[in-house]
Image (cartoon, rainbow, N blue to C red):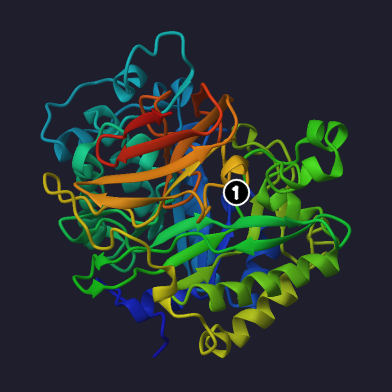
Amino acid sequence: MSKGCFDGSMPRDVLEYYLSHASTAQWLYLSETLDDDIRAIVNAGVKFLGRASGIWKGEMPEDEHFEKSLALAEKVHKADPEIILQACIFEALYRDDVENVRIPRFVFEAFSLPFEERCFDFDKCVSGNAEGYGFHMPDISKTETQMWFYYRGVRYIDCGFEAFHMGQIHLYTFNDRGYKAIGKVIGMLREYGKKNARRHKVIFDAHSHLLVVNGKSLLDYNAMPLTRFPVLDRGGEKLVLVREGKSGGGISPEGVYEKALPFLYEYDNWGGRDEWAQENLTYEQRAWSQWWGGDQISWFAHQNEEDRNSFLDYTFKWTAINNPDAFFAFPVRRPLGSGEVVGKYPYYQFNTRSSSCENGYSQEATVKRLLEEGYEKYRKYANPSDILDFGGKDVDDSETGVRLPEKVVLYGSFQPYVGAVADDSNSEITRMYYIGDGKYSLSFIMPYKGEYDFAVSTWGTLSACVSPARPYAFSGTGGKAKLIIPEDNTVVKVTFTYMTNEVTTELIQ
């Protein structure tokens, strides 16, 4: 019997079988080379197709989207019934997408609401006044948003999808105290999956290191993009990977306590190659501008074939050595531009280049070799998982039961003045220390007066940041607050309360 067999339950060894053969195959349902894609996927031994369907900005009518998603699932499962297809429900809402979808009766029934003949209401899905906005962050605390998430999840399950990527979950849960709303929606989809999924089981991940409430994880595993450090003495656009946080522990959806849940790394996309950076920044400046002036997959795609193959080999071994609970989702198909214009720009494809896939980047053979080789060869040399532990381990908020993060970092332009790298959300030098009662603190001396900026990153990443300048969590470095230092040699103490996102700053002369 194959290690990938499951029905109704997925023990950790089965989950890890799929994660150890994982990929990102983004928007595979749109592929114009699908026959060759499936050939390459089966040939390489890939068993998990991440992001195979989903929308950021809708590129076609809703029913057509799901017709294509169903056709993809049927074609993939005919080639290999074992493969898990993953759909995405993201942290992005577009008015045109939402308000053109009629709400099916089953959605009202699932939420115990009287049936109405209407479409989804964009304004009911967001916080504040969204009049005039065509795009907004959803607010999962809103019932309308929960209905939207549930509706899309059900339709993907009916198409044959068995996994969900829930995007930057800490952003749209900013008003969801105790994660009650997102927990409700995920729970409803799990229940629907028990009855209607292909193998009576659906699994969930999100960009998170931890989503544990009352000791129980809402997610089956956690997932994050990789983090890099540029190398300037080797020529070209070289970089190395950096260990950043880990996957937290808790009781898994299977009911088993795990010291650390499985973790999945990926090469992410968010905007493609920044041509302005290529033309206007110096070599050194570009080195620190995202991934040499681009996002992760566009940097990877712009390397030559030999370097791409070498970096896949490096990433695979790096994952096995640096995080014994982690796996790497090989890029099978990934967009080389913004998610808002999906379908109108090229993709990275791992296929061996041929007349059947003229845009192939020819990493198929390397992926096949590494998947056949497996992680265990390198796991025996791995650093222990405890090397990734930080303060505040297994501490829960007393009111909501939400598990607190183990790593919290203060980052910003002030960092070089205390011996760290600017905007390094992963810095150990400016890591905040858990002081109890859900609070983290860091004190430091600023030798020079002036205006700086700062923010707090939870788990040491840029996916869930907070600052006094923003009322809700944000992603990236653009939401930082000002740090005004009035005199040389000013002592600064910053305190952060996780559950309320309160950040206080004290200055001592």
Q: Answer above or below: position of 348 versus 261.
A: above
Answer with the quarter of the image where residue 145 lies: top left
Q: Residue at x 53, y 73 (%)?
A: 322
Left-right relation of 99 to 323: left
Left-right relation of 498 to 245: left
Q: Residue at x 31, y 35 (%)?
A: 501
On the image, the x and y values in percent for residue 107 come to 22, 36
On the image, the x and y values in percent for residue 263 come to 44, 66
Is residue 439 something that shows in the picture?
Answer: yes
Can you identify the residue that label 1 sits on?
419
Is residue 331 something that shows in the picture?
Answer: no
Amino acid type at image mark 1? Gly
On the image, the x and y values in percent for residue 361 come to 79, 61
Q: Work out which quarter of the rendered image holds the N terminus and state it.
A: bottom left
Q: Work out which quarter of the rendered image holds the C terminus and state it.
A: top left
Q: Residue at x 41, y 57 (%)?
A: 161
Q: Answer above or below: position of 195 versus 483.
A: below
Nearer to us in this view, 46 or 252: 252
Left-right relation of 367 to 105: right
On the image, the x and y values in percent for residue 131 come to 40, 9
